[in-house]
Amino acid sequence: MPVSRREFLNLLAAAGGAGAVVKAGAALGIMPADAAASTLDLAAGNGRSAVILGGGISGLATAYELGKAGWDCTVLEASHRCGGRIFTVRHGTLIDELGNRQYCEFDDEPHMYFNAGAARIPNTHRTLLSYCKELGVELEIFINENKTCWVQDDALLGGKPVRNIEYTTHMRGFVAELMAKAMHESDMDEPFTEAEAETLLGMIRSFGDLSEDNVYRGSFNAGFASGGFLNEGVQKDIIAFRDLLKTPFAMTLLRTNEGETGPILLQARGGMDRITEGFLRQVGDRVSYRAMVASIQVRDDGVEVAYDQDGARRQIRADYCFNCIPTHLVTGLDHNFPAHYVRALKFVLRGEAYKAAFQAKERFWEKQDIYGGISWMNNRSQQIWYPVAGIHQQKGVILAAYDYGGGMYHTRMTQQERVEAHLADGEKVHRDYRNLVEKPVTVGWHRMNHMLGCSARWRRSFREGWTGETEDHYRTLQAPVNGRHYLIGDQVSMRSAWMESALLSAHWAMNDLDRRLRNAPA
Amino acid sequence: MIRLAFICLLCVASLASAAEREPFDDRYCTTCHGADGRGNEGVQAPRLAGMEPWYLKRQLENYRDGIRGTHPDDIEGVAMQPMAAMLTDESIQDIIEWVGGWNYVPAEHTISGDIDAGRTLYQPCATCHGADAEGNEALGAPALAGQNDWYMVTQIRNFLAGYRGVHPQDVYGAQMRVMTTGLNGENDINNVVAYINSLSD
């Protein structure tokens, strides 16, 4: 006779005490286990050396971890700064975009910054969060979804911006009404007990805020047209179902609060580059800047790297090499990688993401009850992000555009054209936008010096996903070359673009090397 | 030494305008075009090492003056154009000398095609580019042998599609547009490039 889960737990409690119950409960999915960050337990370096190519977060974490284990590490960074796509733009920051160099002119205030690359830390990215704790990087809550923000589409209500909460409340109401009708008309009760069907109908009513007769007649969830405190609240007009369906946001707005960008998200207080600085406090003396790699030769007893610095070709030799240079730049180096490895390097495509920001002369969004969050626009600028930093200060920095997929549309424009495009898009949401913002900065990641791309694109299309061929190339790049050279970074993960992926990739490489060193004959 | 002079020249220029600011790194060429200008398929940037100084000069000037790299579908050209737009005559000369110091490494072959068919297709090309695709300065035709084959494929496509060679001042480009009309479809393009590859074996 099968034992029920609860009986099974009772049996275990009798045998092994409460600790065993907790562990088994986690295994059976009843009680949650504590979240575990990826950790390393590396053997002592014993004077071994590593050359780390690229001062992105995976390279810095490698230098930090190997350094703790007593390795001799050197980081070669091609640009004037570490962090790669962890890039916070503030007063005086150089944006070294090819053909479009900019110096940021924002006011010199702590809250006046723009995270042009990494900007959100999901609460489940444990390894990154654990480093933030270890390195003393102060975190604060980031607000991604704010239903007071706007939704704007020229096809919806003649282009009039609508509060996200209005749109989604009405959409839920009409969808719930359909569900409730379907439940009565078909034999939906069939698979459910009476109690289950009652609960389901209750959920549908509550989901859409339906009346007793299962009809949607508007909801105070969408906000008050007037009143609400000292006078009775007046309900806002309903937007017709047919109107709601005129925008493709119908397909996305109800799920923007889910998944990896669902709450809780965090950010480093003062700018995401505080994370880079946290690592640099530990390993900054190991980093050589403006050192541009020209050659990687993997030998049986180590790795030889040639690089250009101060107008001279220099050489460094180390026992092992960890390389977070983007794949599409590695292909342009002198190297002796095997043919199948080069094929895999060439398979990965360059990301095209694009972001832009303005300094706002006043925090006009706060006058509209908006504190943080994103307004969605069905135009090429796509999003406006309102800052969490500096609430109720005079000025703030807003994200004016974020094209995370096909950023080439703006990348190909001149700076003036980009700025005009974002002003024209943004003024559809905020009246007088053009006069309220100034000091634009734009970042076309496809052209950023020494990176020439945003996060690696492994998939040929979203529909296709990861094919067997894709995964073969991925495993090829994850494996070391001749046991001496490891490619690392979020590019060597199945979820590129996240700092967590970069860290886990570095941990994978270090663990793999550590395991091989421990197993090697003395 | 030449390279050092080039870097210092531009660094000084930038420092003069804003002394307190981060000076920028002016070794931009190799970011895209690879170590020692060997070309980089990963960003579709062609080999510069070994390129004739007169051809490099003409193309940099064409880019700078908007004669090349302005058609929105010339994907790599529009990335190059703003880079060249900030160059002075002096810095173009410095770049040419810098590039001249790089070791020439023949490009790896990545295109396969029918070499015999390509030989026939190449005959009109040989008039300007030479029987061994060695180039001819007097006719303004650059060497093709040793250039990245994927780059030659892209450029032939660009000429055919009118992404390159349509500016009224692009005299040589206009000639190329006429010549490439003899190539019908991707097979012809691959075959002629495969033949050019065979010349540098």
Image (cartoon, rainbow, N blue to C red):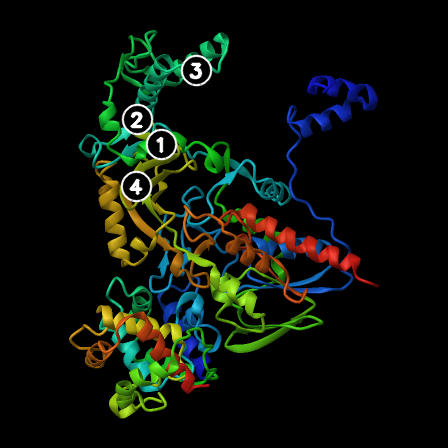
Residue labelled with disc 4: A361
Left or right placement of residue A369 versus residue A346 in this view? left
Q: How many marks?
A: 4
Residue labelled with disc 1: A253
Q: Tell me: residue A352, above or below residue A219.
A: below
The chain letter under disc 4 is: A
Three-letter residue code for mark 4: Lys
Q: Kindly indicate whether the residue at mark 2 contacts the one at mark 1 (C-beta within 8 angstroms).
A: yes
Task: Say which label, 4 or 2, has the lower sequence index.
Answer: 2
Whether callout 2 and callout 3 share a subunit is answered yes
Three-letter residue code for mark 3: Met
Q: Nearer the viewer, residue B151 or B121?
A: B121
Residue labelled with disc 3: A203
Q: Would residue B46 be visible to someone looking at this image?
A: no
Q: Residue A75 sits in which quadrant?
A: bottom right
Q: CA distance from mark 2 to mark 3?
A: 20 Å
Residue labelled with disc 2: A167
